[in-house]
Image (spheres, rainbow, N blue to C red):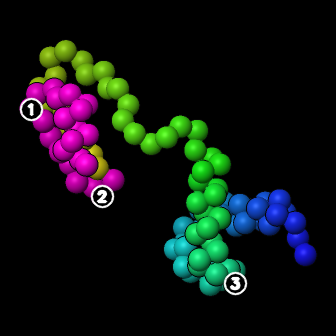
Amino acid sequence: MQNRDEVKQHMFAHIEHWRQSGISQKKYCEQNEITYHSFHYWLRRYNNCNDQKPAGFIELQIPTGQPCMEVLLTDGKRIIFNQPVSSSYLKDLIN
């Protein structure tokens, strides 16, 4: 039986291979005989280990004289502003 570190390294390697494969998580799990639930457990652990900083807002420097700003959301939707807005306004709008 493998120890915890060996299992971790093995699953992290699978996650890296999956990311490079371009196929869905479900299909990768089927092809490699990994339970979907187990894969997601290790994917969460992998993401927690590899996150350098928490997700959130970053400060934007908008050049003077720009007519508007645009926020592109992860689902592809866009929010366009005709004037600068505060980060707290954006947080309230998105949440």
Quarter of the picture holding the N terminus: bottom right
**Residue in the picture at 25% in, 31% down:** 87
Count of picture labels: 3
Residue at mark 1 to residue at mark 3: CA–CA distance:
52 Å
User: Mark 3 near mark 2, Cβ–Cβ under 8 Å?
Assistant: no
Outermost residue toward the right in this view:
1
The numbered mark, 2 or 1, whose residue comes first in the sequence reads: 2
- The quadrant holding residue 19 is bottom right
Which residue is the site of mark 1? 82
CA distance for labels 3 and 2: 31 Å
Q: Amino acid at mark 3?
A: Glu
Name the residue that disc number 2 marks. 75
Tell me which residue sits at (63%, 58%) in the image: 45
Which residue is under mark 3?
A: 33
Which residue reaches farthest left? 82
Viewer can see residue 20: no
Does 67 appear above or below 14? above
- How many C-alpha atoms fall within 10 Å of the one at disc 3: few (<14), some, or many (≥20)? few
The residue positioned 63% from the left and 47% from the top of the image is 50
The answer to whether 42 appears left or right of 2 in the picture is: left
What type is the residue that disc 1 sits on? Asn
- Using the rendered image of the protein, determine whether residue 36 is visible from the camera's viewpoint: yes
Kind of element beneath mark 3: loop
Q: Which residues are magenta?
A: 74-95
